[in-house]
Image: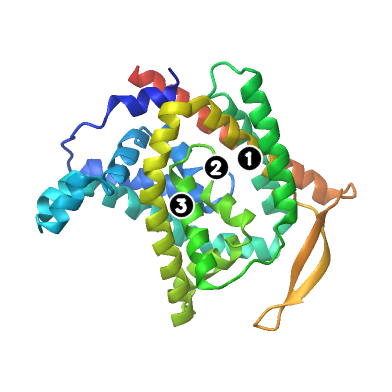
Amino acid sequence: MSELQHHQSKGTESKKRGFKDYIGLGARGMAMGACDVVPGVSGGTMAFILGIYEELISSIRAVGRSEFLRAIVSFRLTDAARAINLPFLLSVLSGILIAILSLAKLMTWLLENQPVYLWSFFFGLVLASVLVVSKRIPKWNLLLVVALLVTAVAAYILVGLVPAQTPDDLGFVFLSGALAICAMILPGISGSFILLLLSKYQFIVGRVAKISDGTFATEDGVILGTFALGCGIGLITFAQLLGWLFKRYHDLTVALLTGLMLGSLRKVWPWKETIETYTDRHGEIQPLVQDNILPGFGTEVWIALALAVVGFIVVIAIEKMGNSELGDHV
């Protein structure tokens, strides 16, 4: 049985916690939120490392189950809160929100002013995540290898077809939220990475950054509200499917996810050449079609390579922490 299956099968026990415990949960949520802002490390991976993954999945899944729904319909709010482990969820989600609000402005600035260095760091993160996630399969066989290769090729082709511009209408924003939030509870794939594939990372993070710099407008609130609604519905729905997939097809699911990440490295390659551009509704010229190119050797390349190595080491270090955490609980 895999580590993930082992943790899922144990079930979540009711825990008595004090104020310090909930502060600790908030800090763990902040670590998850920091990962979710960075396209590379999954918030789900961080939850697994910090020992709250099992309880998080169980609590989220409870939102869509009959015990919680019956309590809500009957206005038994105390029972409803107990059914979904509300204090735990509020503590973790508050930490996630604080981290996202704190880091969004920095990510926006880096994307605009140091894109090559930022993408290099992301590339190292994702590459290491491929290695880490693939190790969750105890024994590879031909079917799993074929599944990985097919998914990797499909992902490589798919991200090449996705233009630098995707629709900004509320329907697509809702869909982006529903897909991206799934990665928060999925060890291996970052929600921000999904937004990158959908070309909505800067679109969403830029609006979150406006909250702290005082330029937040009604339009931004509508967009973020729609995105949050998609996140909520996607999270509750996907939690049910995730538990079922990992329980019945764990190794195949991990192989498919690993292939997706491997093929999607095409999207985060730092050096790109813009083939076509478009003018957005604010009158600014934006890239529409881009090709990956090889850089010329120079100072920028060496700095970029160093940042990629740092990103790779960060993920490996997180994995080592996770192994230590798992060992402490055996």
Under mark 1, the amino acid is Leu
**127 in relation to 287, above or below:** above
Q: Would residue 198 be found to the left or right of residue 274 on screen?
A: left
- Asked if residue 325 can be seen in this view, the reply is no
Residue 154, x across and y down, in percent: 70, 42
Question: Which residue matches tag 3?
Answer: 181
Helix, strand or loop under label 1: helix
State which quarter of the image contains the C terminus: top left
Question: Which residue matches tag 1?
Answer: 260
Q: Would residue 26 be found to the left or right of residue 49 on screen?
A: left
Residue 314, x across and y down, in percent: 58, 37
Would you identify the image quadrant in which residue 276 lies? bottom right
Helix, strand or loop under label 3: helix
- Asked if residue 235 can be seen in this view, the reply is yes
Residue 205, x across and y down, in percent: 53, 64
| Residue for point 44% across, 81% down | 218
Pointers 2 and 1 in contact (C-beta within 8 Å): yes
Decide which of 14, 250 is in the foreground and name it: 250
Q: Would residue 16 be found to the left or right of residue 113 on screen?
A: left
Q: For the residue carrying disc 1, how many other residues have a C-alpha within 10 Å: few (<14), some (14-19), or many (20+)?
A: many
Q: Which mark is residue 189?
A: 2
| Residue for point 62% across, 17% down | 141
Under mark 2, the amino acid is Ile
Q: Which mark is residue 31?
A: none
Question: Which tag, 2 or 3, sits closer to the chain's start?
Answer: 3
Question: Which tag, 3 or 1, sits closer to the chain's start?
Answer: 3
Q: For the residue carrying disc 3, how many other residues have a C-alpha within 10 Å: few (<14), some (14-19), or many (20+)?
A: many
Question: Which tag, 2 or 1, sits closer to the chain's start?
Answer: 2
